[in-house]
Image: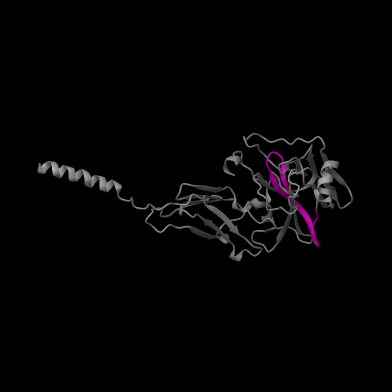
Amino acid sequence: MRISTIKQRSVRDVRRRRRSKPSAIPKRSNDTPSITPHFSESSENDTIVIDCKAGIAQITIVNGANSETATYDCSLSGQNTKSVSFHRLDFDESVPLRLEVLGCNGRVRKVANVWQMVCREFVQIYRSNIVLRKQSAVGTCTRCIDESDDDDDAKLEGHKWAVLLNEKGPDGKLSRANTIDLRVGAILDGAVIYYEDGHKTPCGLHYTQSGSAHYFGGGNSQKLHIPPGVDIVKVEVKLSGWDHKILGGISMTLSDGTKAGALNTSWFTGSIFGSKDIKVLEAGPGEKIVGFYGSSSHYTEEFGIITAPEDVDLPPQAYDMPQLQNVQARDWAKNK
């Protein structure tokens, strides 16, 4: 009898314990870590800031041949590190800067080259006070009639590239661009710049998303030949291609009046956008066009000009800066 009573009380105690309120378990944010460069025309106080609301577990930094990995406390009871800042001058800008951040929530953020993330309006030459200006045309959607013409901050998910009109060839020597093949079909495929030493560089993709070699189409393509001493003074870009933020055409004009390219103007797009459908890119007073930059998926989403002071020769280190080159790995689509 007494044993039976004890057993019954034990069962009731278990039931009461089961009904007790469970202790609260801290929840982590599900947000992906962010990598934000804070760059200005004066690089003395520029920083690269890494944030993660859930806490930072690990940061891997690869700057050329130098590699470093830092780990942080991720325990629920610990003081999680949610923000880390690095100084821009701590890194070598003549080689790519790769960052990979693991959050305490398991989320990962990768950037193949921080130098190509930023400075939409300018590029400061490494170890120099020379600043290059940038301006571009970004594709609009023909279905989005109310879309603003200055939507330069639209999300561009393609390969980011840049090409200078003077570029080092396979032998490491500078070579001048003498021909630009403007690849235009029904839309702007891209362009290819040919240099005097025989090498060429695309304004667009080297490789497709599958890793195979990329080839430009373009039934309306034209070549622009650039004589010595002649500059490119104007680039015109048609903002509307198809309906997915793809540019529609391009033309370039030289200082001697020569013009080449195809803008694919039509009654339909003209009736919707009027003159806003063509964006004119020109160097500012006292400047000259020294290169191009943009973003490309299969076609071109953004095409812009890079300008420099017309009385200044770019220093040698400018031609080694990744943000002024078209650098693309075959597996770029996996790491973008």
| On-image quarter of the C terminus | top right
Q: In the image, is residue 311 part of the stretch drawn in magenta?
A: no
* Residue 301 part of the magenta-drawn span: yes
Image coordinates for residue 307, horizontal then vertical, percent: 75, 56
Q: Count every numbered label the image shows and give the total.
A: 0
Question: Which of the two residues, 8 or 81, is positioned nearer the viewer here?
Answer: 8
Q: Is residue 293 left or right of residue 264?
A: left
Tell whether 191 sits left or right of 70: right
Q: Position of residue 184 (x, y in %)?
A: 79, 39
Which residue is located at x 84 percent, y 45 percent?
A: 271
Please tell me whether the stretch drawn in magenta is mainly helix, strand or loop: strand
Q: Note whether residue 266 is visible.
A: no
Residue nearest the observer in this picture, 173 or 100: 100
The chosen color scheme is one colour
Q: Position of residue 258 (x, y in %)?
A: 88, 47
**Is 135 in front, or is 31?**
31
Specify the segment rendered in magenta. Answer: 281-302
Residue 24 against residue 40 in the figure, above or below: above
- As drawn, 41 above or below 73: below
Q: Quadrant of the N terminus?
A: top left
Q: Residue furthest right?
A: 257
Q: Is residue 307 visible?
A: yes
